[in-house]
Image (spheres, rainbow, N blue to C red):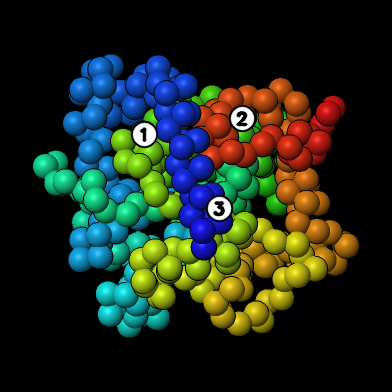
Amino acid sequence: MEVIKQRMADRSARVARACQQHSGTLLQQYSSWLGAAAEWAAVNRSLVTNPDLLVFRDQGLIWCKVPKVASTALVHGFLRVLGRSDLIDTQARGRLHKCIRDMLPHPSPHENLSSFTAFMVVRHPFQRVLSAYRDKLMNRLENSQFQIFQNKYGKLIIQNHRRHPQSKQYEDVPTFGEFVDYLIATPVWEYNEHWLPYYMTCTPCHYRHDIIMHLDSIAEEGKYLVHVTGLQELFPRHAHVTVKASHTHSNQENKPGKLNLSDYEVQYLHRDIQTGGTKSSTEAGFFSELDVQQLKKLYSVYRIDFDMFNFDISPYDSYVKGH
């Protein structure tokens, strides 16, 4: 645990350095996002009540709820802590996320939370972008969500960014390359929460996060979260992650330490198993739609996240066309 404790301290220190390094860009983006004057005093007044910070006041705990990064698994954990595990089997996924926001209200303007322990979970920004694309713009298994995102984003992305005819599979949904073109062309403060950068969602320059877990090591780092909070229920019983296809089975049990996929991501990996694919070839298949310039521009969009949370553009730069 001492090793992980030092790892968390190093990650928090890295975030603090990135806050200083990117201060000017952050101020400009936060002020545009909030519709506030480009002054830190004005921006700070709004960010202090960040709605994505869920506060468990009885336990002195703050969780930044980041979509597409084990958020559903942690919602389940908090519901168990709060004695409302009955909701897990009776409410739709979207409804559960609203319930937990109501149960753990975000910070109020004059609340002093400096003694609280704050935590968040991150994954490689490109993995999260791909996961959001698959789940929200391609996932017909959740028909209502598919229709909502198709009407709000998919149709406009096709209209504005489709330059060539596509196969029947993409007749009514954007390709990954078209989605990336949309991200490049759109100011980040206009993004949906599922692909909004971490530094916008969690405002880590305004609330120090004591525990920053990486999704690919959450089986280990989740134990540290339990160690610090004393809440065994918060250990993720499942999480939507991309793993090697050879290690994925659709009938995996939801046991602590096993990171299970959504049915939709399992479907993708089963397709790759049939062709001898792995995690990397799955990602490579989508990123091979991009050229070098698209990847560099996408990297620029999420550059602050890369710097804050110590991610690298590799191996994605080896997947793209003309690398």
Which amino acid, by three-letter code, is at mark 1? Answer: Cys
Residue 91, image x, y percentages: 35, 74
**Dot 3: few (<14), some (14–19), or many (≥20) neighbours within 10 Å?**
some
Q: Which residue is drawn at 46% across and 29% down?
A: 17
| Marker disc for residue 205 | 1
Write the residue at 27% across / 42% down. 50
Above or below 3: residue 154: above
User: Is 247 left, or right, of 162 in this rendering?
Assistant: right
Q: Pinpoint residue 164: horizontal percent, then vertical percent.
A: 73, 31
Cβ–Cβ below 8 Å for labels 3 and 1? no
The residue type indicated by label 2 comes to: Leu
Q: Mark 2 sits on what residue?
A: 298
In the displayed structure, would residue 34 be above or below residue 104? above
In the figure, is residue 108 to the left or right of 54? Answer: left
Q: Quadrant of residue 286?
A: top right
Sequence-wise, which precedes: disc 2 or disc 1?
1
Q: Which residue lies furthest to the front in this view?
A: 2
